[in-house]
Image (tube, rainbow, N blue to C red):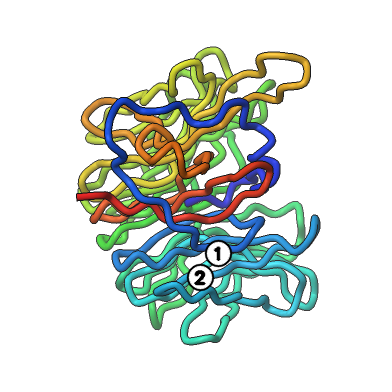
Amino acid sequence: MSLLPSLSPLALAVLIALPPAASAHSPRYTVTQVGVAGSEATDINSSGAVVGNFQFGATVTHGFVNIAGVITDLGTLGGPDSYASAINDSNVIVGTSINTDGYRRAFRYAAGTMVDLGTLGGNNSAAGDINNRGDIAGWADLGPDAALEARAFLLRPGVSMQDLGRIEVPDAEGSSSAMGLNEHRQVVGGSVVGPYSPPESAYHAFLYKCEEMIDLGTLGGQYSVALAINERGQVAGESSTPELRANRAFLYYRGVMKNLGTLPGGEFSSANDINDHGHVVGHSSGPATGESDTGWQKAFIYHAGKMRDLNKMINPASGWVLVSAGGINNSGQIAATGCKGLTCYAVRLDPLP
């Protein structure tokens, strides 16, 4: 689950170069549409409820939740847009919405009510994840001046929003942002670690635990960000390689950041979520093959040391092309974005017996 800029479902569809290849094996998942046309899925809880976002035309986006087949528009904080990032097992949802003043604000949505979570003193904030204790992680401005920094935060029930700081590097200034957390209140995200150095930012994934922000490093480039953490302390995200901007999905555990690679023919990959079994989901993309082709993007699952194309694990006759996987629960259900033609939908993948 990520607060980073992402392609819209319609843009994702344009990236698809080929339909899913037929698999020599029996399908391993069924595909259930859980969102309307123009939607994408961002997270899933233990009961299979899915959250995501859908588009009104080309300019307006709202968060939604699908619980037991019922789709609910989350609405907004008074402005035009909202974005749902995560859902816990109590069906409490967090994300970001524009308010009546035009500022971006972190929200908590429960029982039909969206609540503004405030900031660290500035105008803007965003929520990236929520655990089953009701703790929320995200980022918030430190002050009303746009030049001031933003900070990763942890918001616990009944406690004021906590500034988690940033990775401390001599002579460096910059912001930090929290993307995920677990039940142990271990928080992951990214932090500026130095001045911008073309062609990419000096920005590193972090793990916050025991009141300390730990720099997780990179896969050799200048950039990394952690997007999810499980109860075992395994961290998933993306990082650039020495080639710069050639981002790869990673799995970090006990001081080692592992490059998960790409799907065959791919150039890039990103890991969006990880469950307690260490199964990682995300997407991988590849280059264009001709002047009229913009490249491809496919959803993956990584387990047992191998990245697998989820399109080869569903019935090819279904017509779905899975372009991204946003979340996975401990039962193996996956919240994904699937396309038919140029129209994309939030879908849920349910493991077959």
Amino acid type at mark 1: Ala
Callout 1: SS: strand
The spot of residue 157 in percent (x, y) is: 38, 79
Q: Is residue 210 left or right of residue 22?
A: left
- 68 above or below 194? below
Identified at 44% across, 70% down, the residue is: 155
Alpha carbons under labels 1 and 2: distance apart: 8 Å
Residue furthest toward the front? 317
Residue 164 shows up from this direction: no
Which numbered tag is attached to residue 65? 2
The spot of residue 199 in percent (x, y) is: 68, 21
The spot of residue 141 in percent (x, y) is: 64, 61
Q: Quadrant of residue 102?
A: bottom right
Q: Quadrant of residue 136?
A: bottom left
Identified at 52% across, 48% down, the residue is: 337
Say which label, 1 or 2, has the lower sequence index: 2
- In terms of depth relative to the viewer, which is nearer, 247 or 292? 292
Q: Quadrant of residue 97?
A: bottom right
Amino acid type at mark 2: Val
- In terms of depth relative to the viewer, which is nearer, 99 or 282? 282
Mark 2 is surrounded, within 10 Å at the Cα level, by few (under 14), some (14 to 19) or many (20 or more) other residues, namely many
How many numbered dots are placed on residues in this image? 2
Residue 132 shows up from this direction: yes
Q: Is residue 38 left or right of residue 232?
A: right
Identified at 60% across, 70% down, the residue is: 119
Identified at 56% across, 39% down, the residue is: 192
Mark 1 is surrounded, within 10 Å at the Cα level, by few (under 14), some (14 to 19) or many (20 or more) other residues, namely many
- 5 above or below 43? above
Q: Nearer the viewer, mark 1 or mark 2?
A: 2
Q: Are marks 1 and 2 in contact (CB under 8 Å)?
A: yes
Which numbered tag is attached to residue 84? 1
